[in-house]
Amino acid sequence: MNLNEPRNFWLNVSTDNKMPHADNRYTKLRWLLTITGLFFYVVDIWMDVWLAFKYFQGKYYVWAGLTLGFVLVGLLVTQIFSYAWYRDDMNDVLINSERNAISGISKGELAVIHLFGVGIFTRYYYLLKKGFNVVWKSTNSDTVEERKDVHHNLFCHATDLSMLKLFEAFLESVPQLLLQVYIALAHDESSVLRYLSMAFSFFNIAWALVDYRRCLRRSLPHIREMPSGLPTVIYLLYKLCTITSHILSYSLLLMLSSYSMIALTILWLLGTAWTHLLKTKFCTSRSLELLYRAVIGFILMFTFFNVKGQDTKVAMIVYYFFYFLINITAPTLYILLKPELKTTTFFLTVSSIIFGGSVLGLVSLVLYYLFLHPRGKWHEADEVDGVGKEAEITGRMRNFLQP
């Protein structure tokens, strides 16, 4: 997403006189799915806060601090970006005139809303309110072009929200899942609440991945929609298997030594440095751009994303080579350093999930990108015609974080 040309650049796209395909309409099902996403978001945070409180009661202060810390980091970062995007929209006359989600709210009021951590809920409120008026109370008084713009505008709102949810999932749900898996494996601590927290973190991650991909592709012109059914299942299988196996590998490394945190920190710095070398142009300010690159560096610790919308076949191959190397190294080190545990049910189960998840995830990746990935033709302007609106959109879109 490029904020140098505001994120919502799709509002500047000219439309034809035909109603969009049904897949590009904001439907009643899509509205209900937004409520589902809100449910996963709220319950996941509530479960983690409750778990942190239980840890504190049991005098597990480090676990309580880490559990609550991940929640706060996720909330803080998403509030910062949400406020920055609202502020940029308010500064753009065209966007502010066509997107009335922030009408009547001053920058000071927006700052207060986000300071109290309810910026995401404000976005949910406006999306659900506008979506309800369109899909449940629609009339035939609008022209075809106006209806098309309204539906497209709703997906623009949804894409902003799904991007924030993606940040939150990787900054809060993923490390939370890693922490709780580590506690359950390393300390043999059984707790129904912990398993519920892990389950909702997992669901929140899965939802954020699919929702982000589908909303992004529906909100951008000249990009084919991601089909539902088998393509979505295979894509989700690829992401969840690779992320889960990586989390278990990191857990084994942390069980071997707490100094493994140094290695994980180095991985984060490498991902951040790579994002910096790509010279991303996501934000309107230098400080926000650096924060964005740090966030993407953290996401890259767990899964691959196309950071600039460019051909990343080589980068993806290199990434998953090292991904597989880490997943092999973790169980191997565990065998070498703790040989007495190599035949235990625990080790065999975890190793099987790591290897099985790695293979299944990589096979799903290959199947998806070879046979199921929607492909659209990019329109590039030549030197004679100059840069037209479609080419401008294409160039900016390549700065957007893409699955």
Image: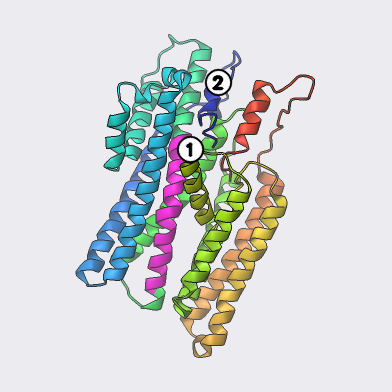
Q: Nearer the viewer, residue 267 or 47?
A: 267
Q: Can I make out residue 160 in this image? A: yes
How many numbered dots are placed on residues in this image?
Answer: 2
What secondary structure is marked by label 1? loop
Residue assigned mark 2: 12
State the residue lying farthest toward the front: 286
What is the magenta segment's predominant secondary structure?
A: helix
Whether residue 192 can be seen here: no
- Tell which circle, 2 or 1, labels the residue nearer the N-terminal end: 2
Query: As shown in the figure, which amino acid type bears the numbered disc 1?
Result: Ser
Q: State which quadrant residue 15 falls in.
A: top right
Q: Is residue 115 left or right of residue 346?
A: left
Density class for disc 2 (Cα within 10 Å; few <14, some 14-19, many ≥20) is few
Task: Name the outermost residue toward the bottom.
Answer: 340
| Viewer-nearest of discs 2 and 1 | 1
Task: Tell me: 266 left or right of 317.
Answer: left
Separation (CA) of disc 2 from disc 1: 22 Å
Classify mark 2: helix, strand or loop: helix
| Depicted 206 relative to depicted 388: above or below | below
Residue 108, placed above or below residue 52: above
Q: Amino acid at mark 2?
A: Asn
User: Residue 89: x and y, percent?
Assistant: 43, 27
The x, y position of residue 200, in whole percent, is 37, 55
For image coordinates 69% across by 59% down, the residue present is 318
The residue lying at 71 percent from left, 50 percent from top is 313
Q: Where does the magenta region start and end?
A: 159-184
Q: Residue at x 40, y 38 (%)?
A: 82
Which residue is label 1 attached to?
A: 285
